[in-house]
Image (cartoon, grey):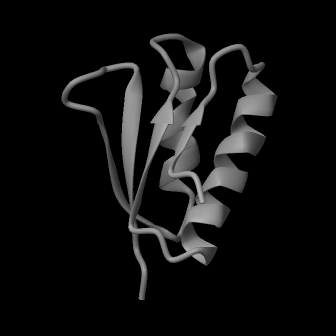
Amino acid sequence: MKTEIDLHGLKLDEAEREVMRFIDQLYYNGETSGRIIHGMGVIAEHLPHWLESYPFIARFERSTFNAGATMVYMDIA
């Protein structure tokens, strides 16, 4: 199971679908975290809205070492 996804080169709607698929995979595989590489453009602007609407996510934050990536922490019960 991969715990990282790179959204570079995707259109906005493609990126949203890939993020949701990725989050589902993390959850159903019991992963506690994952990393989304998105760059600094329009996907980065929309990503928080997508993640806020997802019930499996406990929290998320921009990576300390790379502002073009976001760490996602899962709510695994």
Q: Quadrant of the C terminus?
A: bottom left
- Left or right: residue 21 compared with residue 43: right
Residue at the spot 39% in from the left edge and 36% down from the top edge: 70
Q: Position of residue 52 (x, y in %)?
A: 48, 53
**Residue 53 falls left or right of residue 72:** right
Q: Residue at x 42, y 80 (%)?
A: 76
- Determine which quarter of the picture holds residue 28: bottom right
From the viewer's side, name the closer residue of 17 and 54. Answer: 17
- Nearest the eye: 3 or 10: 3
Residue at image position (56%, 29%) is 46
Seen as rendered, the residue at the extreme front is 1
Counting labels gives 0
Q: Position of residue 26 (x, y in %)?
A: 56, 64
Above/below status of 20 relative to 43: below
Name the quarter where the N terminus is drawn: bottom right
At 50% across and 77% down in the image, what residue appears? 30
Up-down relation of residue 1 to residue 11 (above or below)? below
Q: Residue furthest bottom?
A: 77
Position above or below: 1 against 5: below
Q: Judge left or right: residue 8 versus residue 73.
A: right
x, y percent for residue 53: 56, 57
